[in-house]
Image (cartoon, coloured by chain):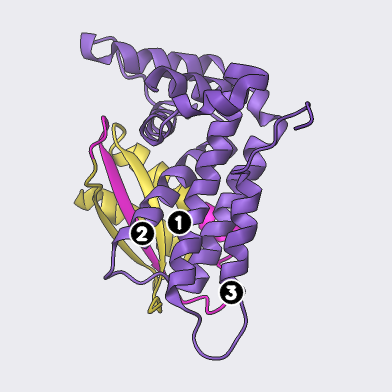
Amino acid sequence: MAKGKPTDPLDPLFLIEHAERLTTSEGGGRPPTIDSRRAASAAYYSAYHAATRGIAQSLFGDSWLPGVRWLSHRSVIDATGLVSRLGPASAPDPGSAPDQVRARAVWSIFQDAGGAGDDLLDVMEALRSLKVEREIADYDRVQPVSRAAAQNLLAQAKAVLKFFESSRVDDPDTRAFFALVALKA
Amino acid sequence: MEDLHAKILEAVHGLVGEEAGVDVGWLDESTDQEEVLVQVTLSDPGEDTWDQDVTNAIRTAVRTATAEVMPSVVATTRLVSSGDDG
């Protein structure tokens, strides 16, 4: 194998492109719902892999491919909740009571950064929302998953990917999110 | 929770009209923070997707309403179609 930048076999873009083929297939009759379910599931995984790739690259540099395995779904999702709750510039001061020390620390970090940007807050929620949808798509046999819904989730996943491939990963609010994920891993 | 539902319903209706439905419940998941799942039912987009600007505006409105009524809670929004029959 040639040396150079490592390639990612789980490149989020590959996952999205694969899922888009599932939701745009043509043919007679109604599209099979299993295609929509697999696409909805892939939408979450592409967003998760986009986030963890950005975090791992920030933490481990060129060794990010093995390093990314230290991150977990739980650490990412929990950190998104912290950013959503304590990150906005308008978030209230949690106060200085002993049980609020950690929350106040997170709040202070984001206040110092001028608050989490609206685009970061959108991404935080998209990650949680896509995870909820993935669990429905993969486990819930009662709730339907339509093709239109799956396409909407893929659009959300693409927005997440775009964010983590932008220069926003170098900004203090995004780096604070990365740090929170790492601390929770 | 009733106050939160009313606040979100008002915000969503202001954005997309009164046909939209809103359900709010605790997200049943082992997480270290309180989290509500807000399900917004929009008119069926058919083979299209919803306008991303509109869906982003809904999510922002839900976040704002939640921060106002229940600041210690994290909200996650789920958008479903009124015609979601698979």
Label 3: how many Cα within 10 Å (few below 14, some 14–19, many 20+)? few
- Mark 2 belongs to which amino acid? Asp
**Residue at point 52%, 71% (across, down):** A148
Mark identifier at residue A138: 2
Q: Nearer the viewer, mark 3 or mark 2?
A: 2
Mark 2–mark 1 Cα distance, whole angstroms, equals: 7 Å
Check disc 1 and report the residue beneath it. Answer: A41
Image quadrant in which you'd find residue A34? bottom left
Could you tell me which secondary element the residue under label 3 belongs to?
loop
**A80 to B45, vertically: above or below:** above
Spot occupied by residue A82 in the image (x, y as percentages of width and height): 39, 28
Tell me the quadrant of the picture where the N terminus of chain A can be found: top right
Do marks 3 and 2 share a chain? no
User: Is residue B81 part of the magenta span, yes or no?
Assistant: no
Spot occupied by residue A71 in the image (x, y as percentages of width and height): 45, 28
**Residue at point 33%, 54% (across, down):** B38
User: Is residue B56 part of the magenta span, yes or no?
Assistant: yes
Q: Which chain is purple?
A: A
Q: Which residues are magenta?
A: B30-57
Out of A85 and B32, give the one closest to the viewer.
B32
**Residue at point 70%, 31% (across, down):** A6
Identity of the residue furthest to the front in this view: A1
Out of A79 and A46, give the one closest to the viewer.
A46
Q: Nearer the viewer, mark 1 or mark 3?
A: 1
Q: Chain of mark 1?
A: A
- Mark 3 belongs to which amino acid? Asp
Mark 3–mark 2 Cα distance, whole angstroms, equals: 23 Å
What hue does chain B carry in this figure? yellow
Q: Chain of mark 2?
A: A
Q: Are marks 1 and 3 in contact (CB under 8 Å)?
A: no
